[in-house]
Image (tube, coloured by chain):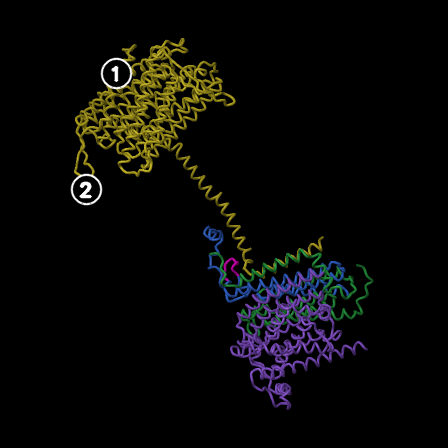
Chain colours: A purple, B blue, C green, D yellow
């Protein structure tokens, strides 16, 4: 009975986190972007600096008419947002917040995370294809191409950490982490973070969405609650990416004075802020630059990191 | 776990893959069917690995290898399919009939040749 | 490998789960080869692979399961979808996805199924393996790959490299053969 | 001494090699007229100089032989003559070829007989070579032509000086080859190449018998050396078989019945060739062989009887055929057959001396006649006597020389033919052969006919009205020039030189003249000539051959021997060959083609499955695999 209760509590906590954290990140984006661009951002909803803006947005989305184009493949069109969203939810199950504070500690947790995150892109492809809109299809194909290219450096960078820690378990990796891993795994961290950004199709890697040329890519035809789900998926993605980077490269809950989970949250939010900051600061990559960065920049760097990790591991052993 | 369950599932999957390879016109669908067959084999490997308690994990390792090979296969296969599509604007397997005797059914097949039997000219035309 | 094999009835929990997953896998595989919509076939394939990954999990081969998800779902199906879109797949039903020898294919596939199923049932009808978690964890698998199977592994990496180069050469139009 | 003999044989051979390889040297010159002239000039030197050297050597050899002492007693009756005339003889074996059974000795020998014939060969060859320089002046293939003549001369000398039957046979065959090449010299004309092939095939037919005859003799004697063969004790039956076989070769080479048909056709070749090969030397080879192996023939009386019959038929038939021919060269050709039959008759009658004597004189006067005929033909531009007439004024030297030749042919004194023919007839008269009366009658008749045809040819060529033919229209820009002069000097000299022995050679053998038979034959010859003259006198425009009446056509066609051969041999063989071709084309090829067609049509059914659809193939593959699996499980 206690086990069931334990599992139920964990799941509830995760669902709550799943619902709350993206909202916070979203609100943060609104405000941070606004201030970086010397404007105010939402100010009215909820009173204080428009804190309830995203909730209001959610209500608005829920109320809007759900339009499905006549030529669309209705079923796929309907499933696509779920496919985009669910993997991140599942990933959150295995991300440890503190020692033992984890939905489920998997032996091959890192692998699980990478595998499941890869599914997320399917949502974009499905949405793009099912919309029966050539911009959407283009966006879907761009998403697919982007995923194929950036999956490799992502996995390579992650495996570098796994190699350093000698385990695939996320909790294990965080436990093994020492401060000098920061310089040691710096390249891997950057590669992982950049590749993760690309997988999330966040600016400057938002070529698949690129409003100015293909309107909104896969999401062109989406309205109402389904569009909201896509947006949610994006912000959950930011949370998950930040959390993973935190766990893998920044020691997770490790930190002085403050309790572990707090450290984790702090690191996650700092990284989320970096994601927003990057969005505001950099222009969008062109498609060929995007691919070039992956294959000429990140993959060799990741391989270099792998070699470095290997050498150091052998020297230490 | 009765080994017969995964093994039967695998046999069924394999047969379905066979059907797909034989019956599908679209080359990509044929590739998918091949993947089904490979997966059936993988399931078998895993099941027997578990059953035989292989200390070297031959079955599972081999499964990983098969997955890798499948990735390579799909990459090459798609490259070929795309090359074919670029050249012919079609990837229907049963329209790719350049190897057929008369070329009558392939749109890009060789020009019609007399199907005369035993003619010298016919023999010369076909080295 | 002789164990005290329990009877087929009642099935144990893992067996029930596996059978359900197998049902999903076989059903979605059937849909893959019968659906009239190209993209749906790929999506059913995802379901099939996912179910199979679940089956691997039940069979305690968790590493294989995640690799299955990572490579098959994350890479291969995406690649397939990519190919489908590059070859201008239409939305909706295509009438001509099945070729002429469909009935021969049905016959052959049924015969194959009959032969295979009867053979495996006759051969492994009583085989039983108790499931022990941890069999397919990353550690034992990794150590056996990099100890016993390292040579095939290296050969495989060469194969992958060759496939990579081959795919590049095949798909790039600006690389010409020697005239 | 033997080295001189070797030199004599090898000199013409070297001339042939040099002529073939060197006359167009240095290479690279284009085929212009100048180059051709230069090549012809070179070839003439290559041809004439060695032959002259060989002639000098032969004469020296003869003089040596005449002064030498006889080596021993004559080994067989009749050999005294040679021994008396040219007693010296020499023999040398260059090498022995071990064959496993009977060894072949590469032996050359020179004795009276061979030196005599050798002189004849070299003289005629030299005359012909010189003559050819003029006769073939504008022929671009003169170099190869003269080289082949040299090769031929060498081969004939090899036959003459051979001391071993196999060596002799080698020379014999090379002669056949050269004969083929030279008859077909103008091969562009289909008739010429046909004549060449005919000559080759007919003589080959005889040569088969000849070769087996040599084998029979050689194996019976245990050696191929001629002396060994002649002195060996060979059973009579074997001897008869061997000589009969040899007789086939003799008949082939010497154009005796029944293998005579090639000789008239061989007149298609250049006239000097006719003089050399088909009058003076090659045909003489057959007679020479009989004389050379005469002891063996003497031991086989049936063979001599057969030879007598053959000779009797041949001399009379050929003479009659000669009487009806219109082509001057064919007249001479048939007369050659007839005269060779005389020699054969002399041999059959038991006198090789008479035969060889006639061979020598005949060689001289027949060569003379042919060369003269060549000059006439050269002058007139046609072979046919219908186109000739009244030429005695325009070609006086030729006329004189040919008169001598015809006189010798008729056997009028004092020309050489009188003495030699008399010797032959006397030999026949005194023969003890069972065929003697028949032979004698035939010989006398032939003498008459010979007189007739010789007279006819003489009259029709040099007397009577001149038949001036309109010359063909010359190419524009050149004037109408009638070349009324005689042949060039290089042609006249040999004719003049040959006229001397034709006239005088008889006195060399004048020792024993049977004046009785000589008188008879002279009267008969004059009778024949007189009849012809009478007929010609009556109507100089017309052919005196009309006196033959209905018999004329048969004579002109040589008694239809060619037609008979064609009907008996050629046509059935052709029909058989056609049948074989048809069988091959329809039955054999039909079977092959039918098998192919059957396979193809069967494969057509199989091909129906080859639609190019890979899935279909895989379906079949898997279905088959399943069937095999099930069968293996069920049956195994």
Q: Quadrant of the N terminus of chain D?
A: top left
Q: Name the residue under label 1.
A: D504
Residue D318 against residue B41 in the figure, above or below: above
Q: How crowded is mark 1: few (under 14 residues within 10 Å), some or many (20 or more)?
A: some
Disc ID at residue B90? none
Dot in front, 1 or 2: 2
First along the sequence among labels 1 and 2? 2
Q: Is residue A44 left or right of residue D481?
A: right
| Circle 1: element type | helix
Residue stretch in magenta: B97-104
Please, what is the dominant secondary structure of the magenta stretch?
loop
Q: In which quarter of the image is residue D401?
A: top left
Q: Is mark 2 on a helix, strand or loop?
A: loop
Query: Where D46 sits versus A313, above or below?
Result: above
- The disc at residue D476 is 2
Give the quarter of the image for residue D329: top left
Q: Position of residue D392 (x, y in %)?
A: 18, 25
Tell me residue B97's x, y (percent): 53, 61
- Say which of D567 and C166 sits in front: C166
- Residue A192 is drawn in which quadrant? bottom right
Q: Is residue D293 left or right of residue D357?
A: right
Specify whether residue A148 is painted magenta.
no
């Amino acid at each position: 009975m206690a086990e069931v209760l334990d599992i139920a509590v964990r799941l509830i906590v995760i669902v709550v986190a799943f619902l709350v954290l993206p909202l916070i990140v979203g609100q943060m984006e609104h405000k941070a972007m606004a201030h970086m661009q010397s404007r105010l951002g939402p100010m009215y909803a909820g009173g204080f600096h428009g804190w309830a803006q995203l909730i209001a947005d959610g209500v608005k989305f829920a109320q809007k008419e759900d339009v499905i184009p006549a030529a669309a493949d209705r079923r796929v069109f309907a499933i696509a947002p779920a496919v985009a969203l669910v993997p991140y939810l599942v990933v959150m199950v295995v991300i440890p917040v503190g020692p033992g504070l984890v939905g489920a500690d998997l032996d091959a947790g890192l692998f699980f995370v990478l595998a499941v995150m890869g599914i997320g892109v399917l949502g974009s492809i499905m949405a793009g294809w099912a919309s029966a809109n050539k911009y959407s299809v283009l966006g879907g194909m761009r998403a697919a191409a982007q995923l194929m290219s950036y999956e490799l450096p992502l996995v390579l960078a992650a495996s570098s950490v796994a190699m350093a820690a000698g385990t695939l378990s996320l909790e294990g990796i965080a436990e093994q982490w020492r401060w000098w891993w920061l310089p040691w795994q710096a390249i891997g961290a950057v590669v992982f973070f950049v590749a993760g950004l690309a997988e999330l199709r966040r600016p400057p890697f938002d070529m698949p969405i690129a409003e100015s040329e293909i309107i909104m890519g896969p999401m062109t035809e989406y309205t109402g609650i389904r569009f909201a789900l896509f947006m949610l998926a994006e912000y959950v993605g930011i949370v998950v990416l930040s959390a993973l980077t935190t766990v893998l490269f920044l020691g997770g809950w490790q930190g002085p004075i403050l309790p572990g989970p707090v450290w984790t949250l702090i690191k996650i939010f700092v990284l989320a802020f970096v994601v927003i900051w990057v969005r505001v600061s950099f222009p969008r990559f062109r498609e060929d630059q995007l691919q070039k960065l992956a294959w000429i920049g990140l993959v060799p760097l990741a391989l270099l990191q792998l070699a470095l990790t290997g050498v150091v591991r052998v020297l230490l052993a | 776990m009765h080994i017969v369950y995964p093994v039967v599932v695998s046999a069924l999957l394999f047969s379905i893959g066979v059907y797909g390879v034989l019956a599908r016109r679209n080359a990509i669908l044929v590739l998918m069917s091949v993947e089904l067959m490979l997966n059936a084999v993988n399931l078998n490997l895993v099941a027997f690995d578990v059953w035989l308690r292989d200390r070297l994990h031959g079955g599972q390792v081999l499964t990983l290898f098969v997955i890798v090979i499948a990735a390579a296969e799909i990459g090459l296969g798609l490259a070929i399919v795309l090359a074919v599509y670029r050249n012919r604007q079609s990837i229907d397997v049963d329209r790719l009939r350049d190897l057929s005797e008369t070329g009558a059914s392939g749109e890009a097949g060789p020009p019609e040749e007399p199907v005369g039997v035993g003619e010298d000219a016919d023999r010369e035309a076909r080295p | 490998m002789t164990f005290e094999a329990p009877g087929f009835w009642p099935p144990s929990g893992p067996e029930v789960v596996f059978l359900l997953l197998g049902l999903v896998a076989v059903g979605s595989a059937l849909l893959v080869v019968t659906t009239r919509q190209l993209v749906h076939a790929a999506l059913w394939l995802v379901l099939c692979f996912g179910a199979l990954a679940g089956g691997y999990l039940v069979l305690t081969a968790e590493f294989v399961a995640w690799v299955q998800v990572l490579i098959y779902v994350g890479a291969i199906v995406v690649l397939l979808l990519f190919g489908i879109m590059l070859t201008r797949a239409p939305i909706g039903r295509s009438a001509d996805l099945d070729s002429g020898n469909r009935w021969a294919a049905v016959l052959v596939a049924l015969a194959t199924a009959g032969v295979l199923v009867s053979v495996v049932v006759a051969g492994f009808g009583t085989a039983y393996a108790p499931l022990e978690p941890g069999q397919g964890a990353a550690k034992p698998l990794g150590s056996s790959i990099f100890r016993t199977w390292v040579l095939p592994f290296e050969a495989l990496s060469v194969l992958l490299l060759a496939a990579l180069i081959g795919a590049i050469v095949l798909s790039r139009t600006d690389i010409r053969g020697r005239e | 001494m033997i080295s001189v003999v070797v030199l004599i044989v090898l000199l013409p051979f070297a001339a042939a090699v040099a002529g073939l390889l060197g006359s167009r040297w240095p290479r690279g010159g284009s085929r212009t007229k100048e180059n051709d002239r230069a090549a012809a000039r070179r070839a003439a030197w290559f041809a004439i100089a060695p032959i002259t050297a060989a002639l000098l050597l032969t004469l020296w050899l003869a003089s040596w032989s005449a002064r030498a002492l006889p080596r021993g007693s004559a080994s067989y009756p009749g050999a005294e003559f040679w021994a008396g005339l040219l007693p010296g003889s020499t023999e040398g074996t260059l090498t022995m070829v071990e064959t496993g059974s009977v060894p072949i000795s590469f032996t050359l020998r020179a004795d009276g007989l061979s030196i005599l014939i050798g002189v004849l060969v070299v003289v005629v060859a030299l005359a012909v070579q010189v003559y050819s320089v003029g006769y073939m002046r504008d022929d671009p293939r003169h170099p190869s032509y003269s080289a082949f003549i040299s090769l031929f001369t060498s081969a004939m000398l090899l036959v003459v000086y051979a001391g071993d039957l196999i060596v002799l046979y080698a020379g014999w065959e090379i002669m056949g080859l050269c004969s083929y090449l030279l008859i077909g010299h103008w091969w562009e004309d289909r008739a010429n190449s046909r004549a060449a092939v005919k000559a080759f095939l007919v003589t080959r037919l005889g040569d088969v018998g000849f070769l087996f005859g040599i084998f029979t003799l050689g194996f019976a004697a245990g050696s191929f050396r001629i002396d060994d063969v002649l002195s060996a004790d060979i059973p009579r039956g074997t001897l008869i078989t061997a000589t009969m076989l040899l007789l086939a070769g003799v008949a082939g080479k010497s154009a005796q019945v029944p293998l005579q048909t090639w000789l008239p056709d061989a007149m298609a070749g250049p006239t000097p060739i006719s003089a050399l090969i088909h009058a003076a030397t090659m045909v003489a080879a057959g007679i020479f062989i009989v004389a050379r192996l005469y002891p063996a023939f003497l031991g086989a009386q049936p063979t001599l009887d057969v030879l007598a019959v053959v000779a009797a038929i041949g001399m009379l038939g050929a003479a009659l055929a000669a009487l009806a021919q219109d082509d001057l060269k064919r007249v001479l050709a048939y007369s050659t057959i007839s005269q060779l039959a005389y020699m054969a008759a002399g041999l059959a009658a038991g006198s090789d001396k008479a035969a060889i004597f006639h061979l020598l004189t005949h060689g001289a006067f027949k060569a003379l006649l042919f060369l003269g005929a060549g000059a006439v033909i050269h002058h007139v531009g046609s072979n046919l006597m219908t186109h000739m007439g009244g030429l005695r004024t325009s070609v006086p030297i030729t006329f004189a020389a040919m008169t001598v030749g015809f006189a010798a042919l008729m056997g009028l004194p004092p020309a050489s033919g009188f003495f030699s023919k008399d010797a032959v007839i006397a030999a026949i008269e005194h023969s003890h052969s069972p065929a003697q009366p028949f032979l004698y009658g035939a010989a006398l008749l032939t003498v008459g006919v010979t007189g007739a045809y010789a007279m006819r040819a003489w009259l029709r060529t040099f007397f009577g009205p001149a038949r001036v033919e309109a010359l063909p229209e010359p190419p524009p820009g050149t004037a109408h020039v009638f070349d009324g002069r005689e042949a060039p000097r290089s042609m006249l000299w040999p004719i003049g030189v040959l006229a001397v022995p034709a006239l005088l050679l008889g006195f060399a053998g004048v020792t024993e003249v049977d004046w009785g038979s000589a008188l008879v034959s002279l009267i008969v010859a004059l009778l024949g000539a007189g009849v012809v003259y009478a007929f010609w006198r009556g109507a100089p425009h017309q052919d005196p051959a009309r006196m033959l009446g209905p018999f004329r056509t048969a004579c002109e066609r040589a008694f239809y021997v060619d037609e008979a051969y064609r009907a008996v041999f050629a046509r059935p063989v052709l029909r058989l060959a056609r049948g074989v071709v048809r069988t091959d084309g329809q039955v054999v090829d039909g079977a092959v083609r039918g098998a192919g067609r059957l396979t193809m049509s069967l494969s057509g059914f199989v091909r129906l499955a080859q639609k190019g659809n890979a899935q279909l193939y895989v379906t079949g593959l898997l279905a088959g695999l399943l069937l095999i699996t099930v069968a293996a499980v069920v049956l195994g």
